[in-house]
Amino acid sequence: MSVPALKMLPVSQYVGVNRDDPIRFYQLPFIGRLYRRRVELCLGELDGGDRVLEVGFGSGVAFFNLSERYSEIHGVDLTADVERVGSFFDGFGLKTSLRNGSVLELPYPDRFFDSVLLISILEHLNPADLLRAFIEIARVVNLGGQVVYGVPKERPLMVLLFKLLGHDIRREHFSTEKDVSRVARQVLKEECILQMRPLLGIFGGVYEVGHFRNSAGSSIID
C-alpha cells in the first residue's frame, strides 16, 4: 500500500493542544520528519471504509487524511478538548464524532468500526493492561476489520531522541514493541509488521507499525 504524505496545517493553527501533545515537534528539523513519518506509515496501512476510530487523536493531525478514506471519523482520547477540536475541524467541512474515554473501556457498540488506529498509544499502557485493551479494540471492530497501531522501538537512539525532547522514556513508556505485538497476536490476526528506519537505516528501526485483522476465529473474543 502506498504511503501518503501527512496533510497538515501549520502547527500554530491547531487548537486544543495540551503539553503532552507531540504536535509541537512536527516542524522541527530531523525529529519533525520522524514524527510525521510514523503517522504516514500508519495511514498507509488503512483500507478505508465507512467508520474509523482513532484512539488518542490529540489535536487531530491525521483527520484530513482520514477524511479521504472514511465516511465517518470517530475519536476517543483521555484528555483532549473534544468540543474545541471538533468545532475546529467542522470549520473545514470535516464531520467528526469525538469523545473522552479510555482504550480499556471504549464507549462504542460491538462491531462498529471498519478500522481502529492507534499512534503512539499502546506503549503507555502497562503490559498487564494490553490484553484488556486489545480485547476492547477487537470488540468494536467489524469481523475482517483492521487494527493499525504504531509504537516506538526500544533502542538507544529512541531513548536519546526522547531525552533531547525533555522526556524520560523509561518513565513514560511501560510496554515495548515486543510486548504490544505479542499480545496483539493473541487477539487478532497479523497482516504485517513494518519498521521505520531513519538515515537510510544505519541506526536500525526506531518505530514499528503493526497491521492486524479481527478474525472470526478468536477464542478470546468469543
Image: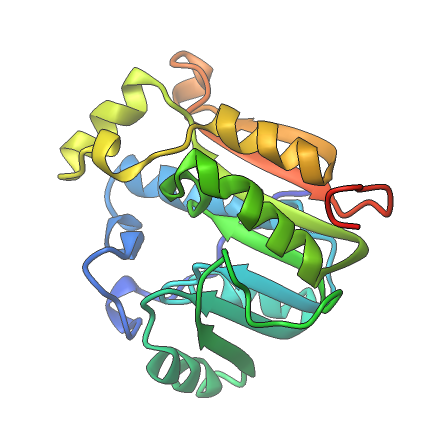
Q: Nearer the viewer, residue 117 or 142?
A: 142
Q: Nearer the viewer, residue 177 or 220?
A: 220
Instruction: Answer left or right for 186 relative to 90.
Output: right
**Residue at image x 72%, y 40%?**
188
> From what the image shows, is residue 65 above or below residue 84?
above
Please state the horizontal and vertical placement of residue 145, each as a whole percent of the image.
Answer: 77, 54
Instruction: Answer left or right for 195 relative to 186.
Output: left
Q: Quadrant of residue 73?
A: bottom right
**Residue at image x 42%, y 26%?**
153
For the image, the number of numbered tags is 0
Q: Is residue 1 visible?
A: no
Q: Nearer the viewer, residue 100 or 161?
A: 100
**Residue at image x 68%, y 32%?**
185
Q: Which residue sits furthest right?
A: 216
**Residue at image x 34%, y 34%?**
174
> From what the image shows, is residue 131 above or below residue 81?
above
